């Protein structure tokens, strides 16, 4: 508790001021936060933790990657708090898998300082790194990353599940990006499992979410994720766009393609949510690191 309080105080004094955010934590939580978070955080400083989750969700869904940098120190403190209790460890697993986004955002912030502010003028908006630079950064970041411990167990088991659905088996590594191969991982918004499936998507592809949540079953979750990826690739005819849709939603990607009169991920990347701008190159870099393949080299089983 003291750790969280001191870290949040430091963040507010330095770069983060939760009081300046547009919505209150209570309002945001009521509209977006999984109800379990309220129950499991009853005896900690709920307002601070919920404020962090709200701010993180806003910035992941915002336009600018560098905006995430301000949350890096606070995230470490919240992670320690969530890991300290068995009940909140699924949320810790979700957050831990996303720390890399905050670290990369901080790297961009340091390497791409804001342009000078003219006297008596509003500060210019931040800029996003082009997709090519994003891919280079994620490749460097993952160049020495060892296999997640759990991957040794799950990757051999789940590759055949993807292959059965006629999806390139290398895409099981999406689970590293989504959950670090932790089947208990749960997002504040309610996504669950190795592949972070939302309830509606899970049910659409044959999984129950109540009374037992089948998203926590690795094989069942992998099968549903593979079916979803197959559907997305069939629609967009491109793995980068399919991955963007897996992260940001099909409607978001389709609307941007139509609005920008575009046909590629790179043509819309800078207008996607900040998380998606990093998600796609992160998955690409993960496949290159773990399997030595590019998205363009993926082959459909039996094709």
Image (cartoon, rainbow, N blue to C red):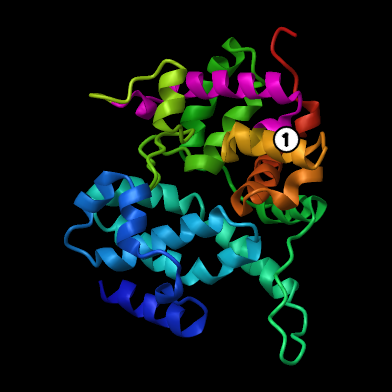
Please give the name of the residue rendered at 75% of the width and 19% of the height, measured from the top-left corner.
299
Q: Is residue 218 left or right of residue 127?
A: left
Please give the name of the residue rendered at 78% of the width and 53% of the height, measured from the top-left corner.
136
Query: In the rendered image, which quarter contains the N terminus?
Result: bottom left
Q: Measuring from the top left, give residue 99's x and y in whole percent.
A: 51, 57
Q: Is residue 205 left or right of residue 242?
A: left
Magenta segment includes 170? no
Magenta segment includes 217? yes
Q: Pointer 1: what residue?
A: 240
In the displayed orientation, state which residue is furthest to the top: 302
Q: Measuring from the top left, give residue 217's x and y in whole percent.
A: 37, 25
User: In the picture shown, does residue 171 fall above or below 220?
Assistant: below
Q: Which residues are magenta?
A: 213-242
Q: Measuring from the top left, give residue 12's x and y in whole percent.
A: 44, 80
User: In the picture shown, does residue 57 fall above or below 51?
Assistant: above
Query: Taken as a whole, is the magenta stretch helix, strand or loop?
Result: helix
Secondary structure, mark 1, is helix
């Amino acid at each position: 508790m003291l750790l969280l309080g001191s870290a949040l105080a430091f963040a507010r004094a330095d770069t983060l001021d939760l009081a300046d955010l547009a919505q209150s934590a209570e309002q945001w939580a009521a509209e977006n936060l999984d109800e379990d978070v309220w129950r499991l955080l009853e005896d900690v400083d709920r307002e601070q933790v919920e404020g962090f989750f709200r701010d993180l969700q806003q910035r992941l869904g915002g336009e600018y990657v560098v905006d995430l940098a301000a949350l890096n120190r606070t995230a470490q403190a919240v992670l320690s708090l969530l890991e300290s209790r068995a009940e909140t460890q699924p949320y810790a697993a979700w957050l831990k898998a996303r720390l890399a986004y905050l670290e990369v955002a901080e790297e961009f912030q340091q390497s791409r300082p804001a342009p000078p502010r003219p006297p008596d003028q509003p500060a210019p908006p931040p800029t996003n790194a082009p997709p090519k630079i994003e891919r280079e950064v994620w490749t460097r970041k993952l160049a020495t990353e060892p296999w997640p411990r759990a991957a040794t167990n799950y990757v051999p088991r789940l590759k055949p599940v993807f292959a059965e659905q006629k999806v390139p088996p290398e895409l099981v590594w999406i689970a590293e990006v989504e959950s670090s191969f932790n089947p208990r991982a749960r997002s504040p918004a309610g996504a669950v499992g190795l592949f972070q499936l939302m309830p509606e998507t899970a049910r659409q592809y044959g999984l129950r979410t109540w009374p037992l949540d089948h998203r926590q079953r690795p094989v069942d979750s992998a099968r549903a994720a593979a079916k979803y990826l197959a559907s997305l690739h069939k629609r967009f005819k491109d793995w980068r766009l399919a991955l963007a849709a897996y992260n940001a939603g099909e409607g978001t990607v389709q609307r941007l393609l139509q609005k920008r009169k575009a046909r590629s991920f790179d043509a819309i990347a800078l207008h996607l949510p900040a998380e998606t701008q990093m998600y796609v190159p992160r998955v690409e870099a993960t496949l290159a690191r773990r399997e030595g393949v590019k998205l363009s080299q993926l082959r459909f089983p039996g094709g």
